[in-house]
Image (cartoon, helix red, strand yellow):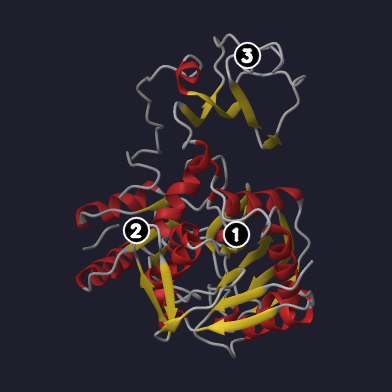
Amino acid sequence: MNPLKIAILSRGPKLYSTSRIKEAALKRGHSVKVLDTTQFGLYLESGQPDLTYRGKPLTHYDAVIPRIGNSITFFGSAVVRQFEQVGTYCLNNAEAILASRDKLASMQELSTHDIGIAETAFVRNPSDILKAIQAMGGAPVIIKLLSGTQGIGVILAESNKVAEAIIETLSSLKQNVLVQKFVAESKGRDIRAFVIGDRVVAAMRRTAAGQEFRSNVHRGGSAQLVELDKEYERTAVRAAQILNLHVAGVDMLEGKDGPVIMEVNSSPGLEGIEGATEMDIAGEIVKYLENQIRFGNFDIRERLSLTKGYSVTEFTVEKDSPIVGKTIIDSGLREHDIVIMRIVRGKDHIANPKGTRELKVGDTLLCYGNKVTLENYLPKLAKRKRRKKKSITKKATTPIDTK
């Protein structure tokens, strides 16, 4: 393909990840600049969003690779969004970066899908802290600052009393914290899967040093290449897709019942995983960008819903639905101006299904079509029954807001 003009948004041009991506892009014949994210100016005018860099007009870039630090998430995502507005392709978009950085929001989003996540609580009232801890089986529990990174702000509380004391102390400092169930069988180790597009390009198992329970390489942990089985690979890719990330580091624990997602990172570091796997991850990122740039910053739900009278919706086929047991061709959906773009059946995702595909009870259909006719296929609203949780009632992600 023709050489691209690429901007890497990073405050540290000499950081390993930034320099490796730049090196990989140059090696593939592209022009690359590392731009300090904090040096941009954003200007908004009707029909003419614009950016400046260090007070001067910004030249055109074909693509942007965001490496947004945790400390500048808000401003950094605003810069990425502005690039999107002027038509520049962004490897990860602004909303996906924001969602992944908010540990609570990302866990809330993941919890609406059939995917393994760490049982999590977020409560406001101090009197509810002990109830939340007991509801997930009692201590030990993991306490996390919402804004922590690289293992900072992650605390293991061995007893209920210690957990209460830690949370109350953080509350007095106006810190928002999550409480997560401790997965004992994974103490001191986890898996980092590096997802690019719809595949895991590399994975490593990280092991903590000594008695440390946090396995982050930045905290002295070691890392080794690991071959993931299909369930772990599928979970990692699905987590990235749910949060709309094209490039992501998905951290999972090895629970007794399978993978348990702890966090999804939108700017995963390359040093640890390239060292452990001896793979050119930076090169894989650039190759993916080369292929994906032709598709642009495309949000299917946003674009399709712009057509008057048409919408995109997702619904589950119920046992009394008139389309149960019929093929897509025989269902009459197409004649009623409805197109099925994807079927989710259990853990299988069937994109652009053929007309001969039979529709079954429990299938979740992603459809685009006329809103009036779509309404005829949507299930009637009904009160949802709460799932019973042990002996204490709580939500799966119950609002610990300590403001």
Name the residue nearer the viewer: 117 or 86.
Answer: 86
Q: Position of residue 90 (x, y in %)?
A: 57, 64
What residue is at 59 percent from the left and 72 percent from the top? Answer: 61
Distance of label 2 from label 3 (alpha carbons)? 40 Å
Q: Helix, strand or loop at disc 1?
A: strand
Residue 154 visible, this angle: no
Image quadrant where residue 26 sits:
bottom right
Residue most extreme to the bottom: 14
Residue 235 vertical position relative to residue 168 in the rendered view, above or below: above
Q: Which mark is in front, 1 or 2?
A: 2
Q: Position of residue 262 (x, y in %)?
A: 52, 59
Name the residue nearer the viewer: 186 or 42.
Answer: 42
Count of labels in the image: 3
Check disc 1 and give the amino acid type: Leu
Residue 46 vertical position relative to residue 70 in the rendered view, above or below: above
- The residue pinned by badge 3 equals 335
Q: Which mark is residue 46?
A: 2
Image quadrant where residue 164 sits:
bottom left
Distance of label 1 from label 3 (alpha carbons)? 47 Å
Q: Helix, strand or loop at disc 3?
A: loop
What residue is at 58 percent from the left and 77 percent from the top? Answer: 8
Q: Position of residue 363 (x, y in %)?
A: 62, 25
The crowding category of the residue bearing disc 2, from other C-alpha atoms within 10 Å (few below 14, some 14 to 19, many at least 20), is few
Residue 10 vertical position relative to residue 82 in the rendered view, above or below: below
Q: Earlier in the sequence, mark 2 or mark 3?
A: 2
Residue 393 visible, this angle: yes
- The residue pinned by badge 1 equals 253
